[in-house]
Image: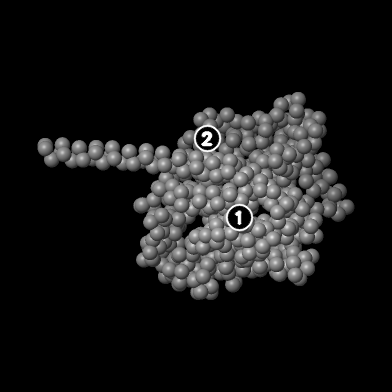
Amino acid sequence: MGSGSSTYRPKCIYLDIDGRIQKVVFSKYCNSRDIVDLFCIATGLPRNTTISLLTVDNCMVSIDPTMPANSESTPYKVRPVATGQLSEKEELFQSVLTQVAEQFSRVFKINELKTEVANHLAMLEKKVELEGLKVVEIEKCKSDIKKMREEMAARSTRTSCPCKHSFLDENKKLAPRRDVPSYPKYILSQETIEALRKPTFDVWLWEPNEMLSCLEHMYHDLGLVKGFNINPITLKRWLLCIHDNYRNNPFHNFRHCFCVTQMMYSMISLCNLQEKFPQIDILILMTAAVCHDLDHPGYNNTYQINARTELAVRYNDMSPLENHHCAVAFQIIAQPECNIFSNATQEQFKRIRQGIITLILATDMARHAEILDSFKEKMDNFDYSNEEHVTCLKMVLIKCCDISNEVRPMEVAEPWVDCLLEEYFMQSDREKSEGLPVAPFMDRDKVTKPTAQIGFLKFVLIPMFETVTKLFPEVDEVMLQPLWESRDRYEELKQLDDTMKELQKKKSASLTTESTQK
């Protein structure tokens, strides 16, 4: 989904170890855990030690392959992060071990040897990247075989839900973490804070702990934590539980949840919604965005209904997935340790619950025309004091955010198309194997990127954002124009595809004619 460098130049990082400068070299193909281990080795700390990296002016640095390089004059300081309080005996024992390790290190030059080995490993990684293609192919074959076996097993259980775990029996993921939340806190820079308020924010650059910190920041920044007396630790536990209850689908995953919520945060800022809505409606919009696809199984409502799954039977074929997302959301809230609404009044909670349910149910695309037509009727005389008008607007806002990927820059939006098509193809392959109807826009033999996007942009996205622009003119330049540009780009791609197909067809016909004449 991104373009890689054509060179294999390793990155050099300089560390300050008790006044001694230690140079550490690693390949860009190392992951964050490998880099942390390398830094631990260089500083004489045990592997798997939780550490933080500080600049000369004590700013925290994110440890990952894209971290900024430094120089000998600006080395990073390594600071172990305490994970618990040690007893007096444990501290003494730890101190003795550290001293012994230091003595061994000085005598045998262990650190120097480890750094040398690490450097050799970095060089070997280049060869692995160049010569390991066969291994990658073997692993891909193994993965394909595993998927085929799963599909074969699924044929005999067609009436059961395709979910990896049953909604009724799933207590493990819903159980809150009772300890103080353990996700590493990511300190947001001012640049990140400002970018977070814009639709151009690149959602692909962030790890899960960083996305959790961004979501936490949004709730604080909008005044929701203070306004509704939300316990900050409860907010952390709730966000962790939300993360744990999104599955690793190609598209409907936690990053999509973050993407939709970040777009909602952007629209609240862009359209000055805090001046137009009461705070409780801002809380409803944000929380509905966070929860809107909880426990999505990767197969849409059409599949659920046609395959007569457990969810379809339970919800009588009426928005089974969206009803399930709501149910999981409030199962999480029902846990006292995760109840971010515990200090709301009974009347407030009733309004919050009903508002969230209404918005999540509105994300069912089967209701798209109904909701948009209703909104258009209210546009000529829109009234913010009319509860029905405001509810309809909130429904349209969450719909905009849910399908807003093409609003983002091309390099951010296009990978989402690949993810969505992968999920579509996964479903259509299963439908074919089970003898169920297959939608043409999900069939890998019939759909392409341009054909998938042109119709969606022209008949769904652009008309909806054009309607919203009438109420919020500021949306025009920031959101509507990128949609027009995206439509034009995909139409150009389709013309190119059509031209290539026509040339191929003529070439094939020409070869057939020549063969017949001979």
Q: Secondary structure at mark 1?
A: helix
Based on the displayed image, in which of its 4 quarters is residue 439 positioned?
A: bottom left
The answer to whether any part of residue 12 appears in the image is yes
Q: Say which residue appears at 83% left-offset and 53% top-offset.
A: 85
Which of the numbered marks, if any, corresponds to residue 397? Answer: 1
Image-quadrant location for residue 288: bottom right
Q: Is residue 247 above or below residue 473?
A: below
Residue 149: x %, y % from top left: 43, 61
Q: Which residue is mark 2?
A: 4
**Horizontal relation, residue 12 to residue 413: left or right:** right
Q: Give me the C-alpha separation between circle 2 and circle 1.
A: 36 Å
Q: Residue furthest top?
A: 73
Q: Is residue 400 above or below residue 361?
A: above
Q: Left of 122 or right of it: where is 213?
A: right
Residue at the spot 13% in from the left edge and 40% down from the top edge: 516
Residue at the spot x=44%, y=42% of the render?
490
Residue lying farthest to the left in this orientation: 518
Which amino acid type is marked by label 1?
A: Leu
Check the image and tell me how it is coloured. one colour
**2 or 1: tag closer to the N-terminus:** 2
At 67% from the left and 41% from the top, the residue drawn is 195
Give the amino acid at mark 2.
Answer: Gly
Please state the horizontal and vertical placement of residue 159, each as a whole percent of the image: 45, 72
Above or below — where is 431 with respect to 79? below
In the depicted view, which residue is nearer to us: 64 or 330? Answer: 330
